[in-house]
Image (tube, helix red, strand yellow):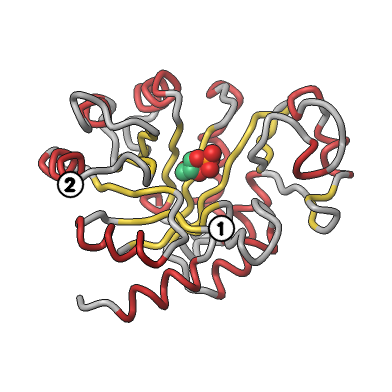
Amino acid sequence: MFIVAHRGASFEAPENTLAAFSRALDAQADGIEIDVFPIQDDWIVFHDRYLQRLTANPGRLLDCSLAELKQMKVFSQQRIPTLSEALEFINGRCTVNVELKGADIARGLTKHLRHAIANYNFQPEQLIVSSFNHHWLRQLKQDHPEQRIGALTTACPLTYARFASELDAYSVHIDVDFVTPEFVADAHARGLLVWVFTVDEPDDIRDLKAMGVDGIFTNHPRLARNILEQLPV
Ligand code: G3P
Ligand code: MG
């Protein structure tokens, strides 16, 4: 089962920072998931729309300039990286799932991904763009048919994974609370991988493995690796 470090190894270090990515690589995660928002002509790695929880600053992320965000620290410890800084640091050492939180495709997301492929040792198939906003994914896929995309959902729709195959997605990413064997079977019949978020509990890891899911997003990739190694293949 593919282990994706959710916001990096965010159990061990401040989420979505280089420290969390470093811990994820130490834990031999197969992938790292990051959340990104467009700021000016760049992309910033950050999960929340508001700054308070992560930086103790008031206000909204999207009201800040890049220069202001570069002065802030996540949990008083770690800088907020840009997408390119994150990709440069990870440097092709694992898959990266870029989750679009606030998107404007025209602002050059794919330019950053192409730059990473040319300069930071990534193969194109190591970069997967996902979002809960399927309109953004459809636009991205229309503009860049070669780009791997992951279709996110917190729901188990009546038509199961049909929405993801309509988007020509590589994978469907579903909330652990709503994934079912029927959903997994439907996705697999459509040729989609099933990745489940967010999974930190050993019992869930065992159940999902038995259900045949292909990957998990976890805050604790080291624990997940240990649990999986103890299970029969
Ligand atoms: O990409 C999986 C997961 O990160 C989606 O939810 O809120 O943790 O970004 P969230
Ligand atoms: Mg996310």
Residue plotted at (46% across, 67% down): 29
Q: Give the residue at mark 1.
A: 120
Alpha-carbon span between mark 1 and mark 2: 38 Å
- Residue at the far bottom: name it: 230
Q: Nearer the viewer, mark 1 or mark 2?
A: 2
Under mark 1, the amino acid is Tyr
Q: Where is 102 relative to 189, above or below? A: above
Question: Is 3 on the left or on the right of 10, as rendered?
Answer: left
Left or right side of 155 for 10: right
- Residue 58 x, y percent position in the rendering: 86, 31
Q: Is residue 114 visible?
A: no
Is the residue 96 above or below the residue 157 in the image?
below
Which residue shows up at 46% across the image and 50% down it? 198
Q: State the residue in front, 127 or 173.
A: 173
Q: Nearer the viewer, residue 211 or 39?
A: 211
Q: Mark 1 falls on what kind of element?
A: loop
Residue 159 quadrant: top left
Using the rendered view, name the quadrant where residue 204 is placed.
bottom left
Pointer 1: residues within 10 angstroms few (<14), some, or many (20+)? some
Q: Which residue is mark 2?
A: 181
At label 2, the amino acid type is: Pro
Would you identify the image quadrant in which residue 178 lies? top left
233 up-or-down from 95: above or below: below
Q: Quadrant of the C terminus?
A: bottom left
Q: Residue 76 location, x and y as percent?
A: 85, 54
Q: Is residue 220 visible?
A: yes
**Residue at position x 23%, y 43% in the image:** 180
